[in-house]
Image (cartoon, grey):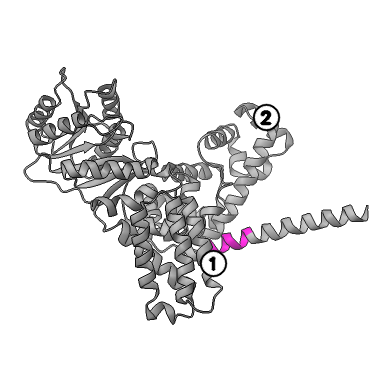
Amino acid sequence: MFDALTDKFNSLFRSLSGRGRITEANISDAMREVRKALLDADVSYQVAETFCKDVTKAAMGAEVINSLHPGQMMVKVVSDELTKLMGPVDSTIYYVSPGPTVILLAGLQGGGKTTTAGKLAKYIQAQGKRPLLVADDLQRPAAVQQLQVLGEQVGVDVYTEETKDPVRVAKGALKHAKKNGHDVVILDTAGRLHIDEEMMAEIERVAKAVTPHQIYLVCDAMMGQDAVNSAKAFNERLELDGIILTKLDGDARGGAALSVKAVTGKPIKFVGMGEKLDKLEAFHPDRMASRILGMGDVVTLVEKAQEHFEAEEAEKLQKKMAQGTFGFDDFLKQMSAVKKMGGVKDMLKMLPGMGAQVEDVDFDGKEMRQMEAMVYSMSLKERKDPDLIDASRRRRIAAGAGVQPNDVSGLVKTFKRSRDMMKSLSGGRFGGIRGLLSGGFNIDAMSQAMTSGKKIKQRSKRKKVARRKVGRKRR
């Protein structure tokens, strides 16, 4: 997500940091690069132009010009302007009383509308509401069945009718919701491969029939400017209340996220960050700006930690780390919780400056299942004390897990490295897991430590290469 744009911005800030002061010429050169980076990221030309003008105006202020650290001040200026571009914050779902609150989801076919309906139902259910999903997409084959499956997965009722009239289904769903105590109705309407008059007329009839309290447009972020153009067209006909961007985790450019609010004037309410039904996040422009600039997203990290780690369990683990009694069973518990948070790689990317440093981390998906299989093939003694695992034990564990002995060796090494890092995290320097849960985790200290660790590895690698070269010359 935003990888190319993040690299461009970081390169720009590094070049400005090397200058003694910022001048109008510096700003002009920098904005030329920023404009190019934004256009490469599929940001609307008009939005890119306006953004660069706003940054230039803010950067030429006395506070930046007279700063001793021009690069740092430019980071703040760009972050503020990115936040304004994507903001303001408005992830609230406005519920009516008495209910039910009617939410209509619109969008093109293939944008992830039906899946988003399931995610939104789960999100609303977690807020103590009783939503009803309505299968009102009567055009796409199997759309009704897909919504029924999603409803079953999240534990939410799905309303269907044997008819081809979407207005009738919408009206019937509203009566059903009132009769059965549902306080939110989510209408999954039909989409098309492109915007056409028939599609717009149909969704206008549905909206007129049930008068939805909120209309959200579901856009595929990977469509870039096409997503922005469709948002503009829908807004002209339906008067949208907000936008939900899907597949944002798969878009390395991010143009839609940066353009859609500026073009439509409507806030981005939520973003889809994965296929799983719990991967719907409230959109926070300031946090997204921080991610784009490679500064991490500590607030979201803390919120996810508070959601998935129990404070009492975290305290037990922290004591084990400090005492050196942290074993493989504890390791699996930790990995399981981290996996629920989105995976090790996603979690580390939320730390400032860590985005480009976690590409080699592979604790997710298939690797995680292999790790579990290897741990469950160990004896209780081996799980508590990995130092017991010698060559013969490695062969036995590998045979039980269906892997190679060197895979077991790799797991043991990974565990020991992780244990050492976790032991460091449990100390006062970083604040430990308890600090993360309370929001008092020392992110800067951890980021610096991991960065310096990487530098040490790089220096060691360079020394090895140099020694090899010397050896060749001697020969």
Q: Amino acid at mark 1?
A: Arg
Total labels drawn: 2
Nearer-the-camera pick, 54 or 446: 54
Report crowding for label 2: few under 14, some 14 to 19, many 20 or more residues within 10 A (C-alpha). Answer: some
Nearer-the-camera pick, 392 or 446: 446
Residue 2 at what x, y percent from top left?
45, 51
In the picture, residue 387 is in which quadrant? top right
Horizontal side of residue 40 vs 97, given as left or right: right
Q: What's the CA distance linking mark 1 and mark 2?
A: 51 Å
Quick check: can you spot residue 141? yes
Mark nearer the N terminus (1 vs 2): 1
Residue 164 at what x, y percent from top left?
16, 20
Nearer-the-camera pick, 351 or 220: 220
Residue numbers of the magenta segment? 445-454
Horizontal side of residue 287 vs 374, given as left or right: left
Kindly identify which residue carries mark 1.
14
Residue 375 at what x, y percent from top left?
57, 36
Quick check: can you spot residue 431? no
In the picture, residue 247 is in which quadrant? top left
Does the magenta portion include 262? no
Kindly identify which residue carries mark 2.
396
Prevailing SS of the magenta stretch? helix
Callout 1: SS: helix
Q: Amino acid at mark 2?
A: Arg
Instruction: Please report the residue visible at 46 percent of the width from the left and 63 percent of the height from the top.
Output: 32
Residue 454 at what x, y percent from top left?
62, 58
